[in-house]
Image (cartoon, coloured by chain):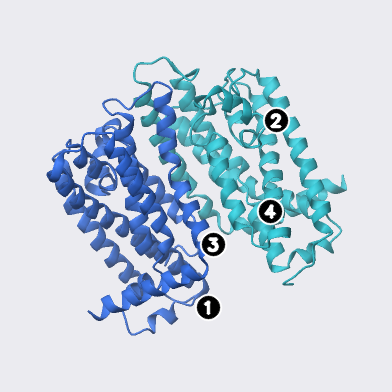
Chain colours: A blue, B cyan
Amino acid sequence: MKYIKMYLACAHTAFSRAAAYRADFLLGSIITLLSNILFPLVTVLIYTNGATFPGWTMWEVLLIQSVYSMSTGAAAMFFYSVVWVTMEHIREGSFETVLLKPVSPLFFIASSNFDPQYGGLFLGGLVLTIVSSAHTNISGLSGILQFILLFTAGLAVMSGLYLVMAAITFKWVGNARIPEIFDSIITFGKYPAGIFPRGIRVLSTLIVPVSVIGYFPASALLGRLEPMAYISLIPCLLFLAFGIWIYNRMIKLYEGVGG
Amino acid sequence: MHKLEELKAVAFATYKEWSVYRTHSMVSMFVGPIYFIVQYYIWTAVYGGADTLAQMELSQTIRYFGATVLIGYLTMDFADWNLQMLVRTGKFLTFTLRPMHHRFFALSQKVGHRILGFFFEFLPCLLIFTLVFRVDIIPEHLGWTAISVVLAFLMNFYINYCIGMTAFYLTQANGIRVVYQLLAQVFSGALIPLNFFPPAMQYVMMFLPFQYTNYITAMIWTGGDNIGGINLSVPQAVLCQGIAVIAAYLLSEVIYRISMKRFTAVGA
């Protein structure tokens, strides 16, 4: 209960801060949104040139990509800043100031760096999801329930990835390109899994379950979910648990060399 | 000759400075191939049985994305970020006191930085594409491609420098930078070859700077004779790129001279 109250207080502060610099906040939100809806533009251009992803209509592929945007927007609000703030603390050798706080360091960094700017991306993804859904055959209540379950699992994967990234910064000091590595891996979740060979499908479902970020939730809405999707729920939870564990483990290795 | 010595000295110092962070550059050895794999499967699926799409064969499209990755490693630039930081903090003052134009200094830095990129990003990825993925990535017209890469390198630099100079007026030019990068991502052909855009837009893009930083070079690299929506030949495309570079250089000089009259070194 104490942690929930603290988190809400931090979120309230973050919104107040955004309101104080609202022009910057709005511009930042719009830019974040625009930079993430470029991938749907590629899909639109592909289909307007008469080509297709075999077995998928344009709106179905857009649905995958809009769910993906929603998922990244939601997870980024809560955890993306953890990567940059941790990286900066390690580089400057100021992580001690976090360790001195009477709460879990991970909780402190995550709560005090809640970033509402990614709300723009989430809302943009939500609007595109609704528009795409209107142009496809949604499979009813069961599909929506499956979607919610898998979307939540996707959030767990994204959050786990952010925590793993943040954990790496403890040893790979100041490398601002770490997110690029993970961005490249999650790209596999933006497209229908059927276009990839079996090996990549297994990897993106069971090992690093990025298919759960966009592909599986959208498939649930469309009523074409594969049984493999349910199996991937386990690695999703494991991935989040691994992210939390590795972050806390790396804190113990912190040496404060930059200070 | 003296200029060349200056360029070599600054480039060498930058190379040494950044080689401390060479593992950061080596991230590209993972990211580049992953990006390429994704593009390979996307476009193989999209083409299906089709011979050509938007006047491009599948093999050319795949080579296009491989070339785009490699060109990015040779031309990558952050002169805009660097310059706006120097202006915002007032540190630019120290450059106005030096007997060397800051733009030339920044260009020399970029040369050193990209030589590092050549060894730790370009060469490893070229080898991975050729030996592991078995992609025929060697340029069709080696000479024209080399000229075009140099022009793309300069174009990227001069445009970014112009963007960076907006800091003389706005102080904090981050918003402009991000907006430009967004536009560049779409209209430079980094996401999708510009042949996929409507013909009218392709024609308009001939008059914008974006495609001269990547698309034209990537098309020349792949040996395409279907460049720019108006089917430019390779020499014509390089000529257009050369004219665009000269225009960008002149624009940067004009903006620089006007900006110097209002630079007050606030924050120094």
Q: Is residue B103 visible?
A: yes
For residue B241, the mark is 2
The three-letter amino acid code for the residue at tag 2 is Gln
Write down the residue under mark 4.
B164
Chain of the residue under label 2: B
Q: CA distance from mark 3 to mark 4?
A: 21 Å
Chain of the residue under label 1: A
Q: Is residue B7 left or right of residue A193?
A: right
> Badge 4: few (under 14), some or many (20 or more) residues near its Cα, within 10 Å?
many
Of the image marks 2 and 4, the number of the one nearer the N terminus: 4
Are callouts 2 and 1 both on one chain? no
Which of pointers 4 and 1 indicates the residue nearer the eye? 4
Which of pointers 2 and 4 indicates the residue nearer the eye? 4
The three-letter amino acid code for the residue at tag 4 is Gly
Q: Secondary structure at mark 3?
A: helix
Residue placed most toward the observer, A138 or B209: A138
Which of pointers 2 and 3 indicates the residue nearer the eye? 3
Residue placed most toward the observer, A162 or A74: A74
- The residue at the point 43 percent across, 47 percent down is A36
